[in-house]
């Protein structure tokens, strides 16, 4: 009963705080909150979106089963921090000047190509679907576990869908960020506190937990872990794939366009991954510590819920809210990004004369239809969802050369971007489906080969053609923005 009451209280708090955000009337405000979000909102928006609820079930189960390999989140987070830094400033400057709402719209501007805009917009929506389904599954699972089976997973998903659709469809990015602030603060403060509480009360503290692993399962402290024979290259592959692809998700990237200043972006780029590494590092430390326990080994995906239930109703309640906060943060951002892409990157490109009012309605109804469809999709077997979700990273890493070269190399052009993106996707998912022997032998994941394919084609195409004229203007926009920034700060400091 206590966990359920705490979940109800959390849902009520999210809706109550968002009550003032329900009046957006343009697609621009729906997608970017009119570029008005400060450092707290952007930082916690990144955090609440990036760290998914399934991390506390499926991915923590990875560390429960195999031990230290789960700590790949630490180097992966460091790489993602670098990627965020590289893309943030230019994305914000062009986004503000040209009123850009999505990552795909940014690429369409940079390459002057509707083709790359539609391709990346469609890919972003398609590759996000498994994550949306897995998060809906997690929400239903939390309700089911918190009520000791009284609420079925289906009913739990319906409750979650009702709440999220209500504030995302009506409030857009402003509501998403407002909810993310609450979710992110809870994850950092209450979430970290309850994880530490369980470590010290149930496992004898960090020293006791690590000593138990060392004595009973020392293989869990080595790569690749017990019961698994994998090339050491696999570790590097998942770190690179996750690090380069982790910030390419449109539901994370799009928050750059909601910020109110470059300063906000730069501070958030530093704070969000740092806080995330600390928070998720603690989660995976606890997951590793559970490895020697028989129940955890037999039920790795339930292990985190189980150990919190052993600590009592209140710890279980706090943990249930923690998982729910992470899931809602991801789901709301995915729905906002997907609906904006469907409306702005697909509908408005295919039919140019769609009005802003119609575009906003398309985005809102997209939220409703995608959520209803998720009720069906989330009943795919969980193991298949996990496989699909992990496979999507093999696609997102292919996008990284298109983004990074587009932002930093003048010679990058639309021919290279379109052909490289299509070829890279074909290689990546072709190898994923066929799974030839060398993938297992050498340990490099298919996404690495897809990334190299895209990078190679873009480099060749870039050197075969001169720099396009519109690119010089875009680079001048960056120079002008940097040149006027100190003056703008001085002006802003003068009294009215």
Image: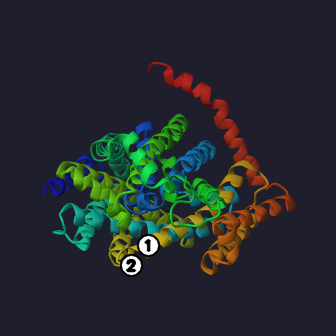
Q: Residue shown at 57%/56% (left/top)?
A: 223
What percent of the width, then of the height, locates residue 37? 43, 42
- Label 2, secondary structure: give it: loop
Does any portion of residue 422 appear in the rendered image? no
Q: Quadrant of the C terminus?
A: top left
| Residue that numbered label 2 is attached to | 380
The image shows residue 74 at horizontal and vertical percentages of 53, 47
What residue is drawn where x is 61% and y is 75%? Answer: 432
From where the camera sits, is residue 142 visible? yes
Residue that sits furthest to the top in the current view: 495
Decide: is 16 above or below 366: above
Secondary structure of the residue carrying tag 1 is helix
**Quarter of the image that includes the N terminus:** bottom left
- Residue that extends furthest to the bottom in the rendered view of this protein: 434
Q: Are marks 2 and 1 in contact (CB under 8 Å)?
A: yes
* Relative image position of residue 323 (x, y in whole percent): 32, 55
């Amino acid at each position: 009963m206590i966990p359920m009451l705490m979940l109800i209280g959390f849902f009520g708090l999210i809706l109550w705080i968002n009550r003032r955000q329900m009046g957006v009337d343009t697609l621009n405000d729906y997608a970017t909150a009119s570029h008005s979000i400060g450092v707290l909102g952007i930082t916690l928006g990144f955090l609440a979106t990036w760290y998914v609820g399934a991390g506390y079930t499926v991915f923590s189960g990875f560390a429960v089963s195999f031990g230290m390999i789960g700590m790949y989140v630490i180097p992966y987070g460091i790489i993602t921090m670098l990627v965020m830094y590289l893309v943030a400033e230019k994305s914000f400057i062009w986004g503000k000047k040209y009123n850009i709402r999505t990552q795909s719209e940014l690429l369409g501007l940079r390459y002057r190509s509707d083709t790359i805009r539609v391709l990346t917009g469609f890919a972003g929506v398609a590759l996000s679907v498994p994550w949306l389904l897995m998060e809906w599954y997690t929400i239903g699972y939390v309700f089911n576990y918190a009520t000791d089976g009284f609420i079925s997973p289906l009913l739990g998903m319906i409750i979650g869908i009702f709440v999220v659709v209500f504030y995302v469809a009506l409030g857009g990015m402003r509501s998403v960020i407002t909810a993310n602030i609450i979710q992110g603060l809870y994850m950092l403060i209450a979430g970290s506190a309850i994880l530490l509480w369980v470590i010290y009360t149930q496992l004898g503290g960090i020293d006791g937990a690590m000593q138990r692993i060392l004595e009973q399962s020392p293989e869990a402290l080595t790569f690749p872990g017990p019961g698994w024979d994998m090339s050491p290259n696999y570790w590097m592959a998942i770190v690179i794939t996750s690090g380069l692809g982790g910030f390419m998700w449109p539901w994370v990237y799009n928050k750059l366009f909601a910020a109110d200043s470059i300063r906000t972006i730069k501070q958030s780029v530093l704070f969000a991954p740092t806080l995330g590494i600390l928070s998720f590092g603690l989660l995976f430390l606890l997951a590793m510590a559970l490895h020697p326990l028989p129940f955890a080994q037999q039920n790795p995906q339930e292990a985190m819920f189980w150990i919190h239930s052993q600590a009592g109703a209140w710890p279980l309640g706090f943990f249930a809210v923690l998982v729910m906060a992470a899931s809602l943060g991801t789901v709301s951002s995915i729905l906002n990004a997907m609906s904006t892409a469907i409306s702005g990157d697909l509908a408005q490109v295919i039919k140019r004369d769609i009005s802003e009012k119609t575009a906003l309605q398309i985005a809102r109804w997209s939220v409703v239809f995608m959520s209803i469809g998720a009720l069906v999709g989330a009943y795919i077997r969980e193991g298949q969802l996990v496989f699909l979700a992990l496979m999507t990273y093999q696609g997102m890493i292919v996008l990284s050369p298109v983004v990074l070269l587009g932002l930093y190399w003048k010679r990058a052009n639309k021919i290279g971007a379109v052909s490289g993106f299509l070829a890279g996707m074909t290689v990546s998912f072709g190898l994923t489906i066929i799974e030839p022997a060398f993938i297992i032998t050498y340990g490099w994941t298919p996404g690495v080969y897809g990334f190299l394919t895209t990078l190679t084609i873009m480099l060749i195409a870039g050197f075969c053609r001169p720099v396009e004229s519109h690119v010089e203007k875009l680079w001048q926009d960056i120079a002008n923005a940097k040149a006027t920034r100190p003056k703008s700060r001085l002006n802003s400091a003068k009294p009215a």
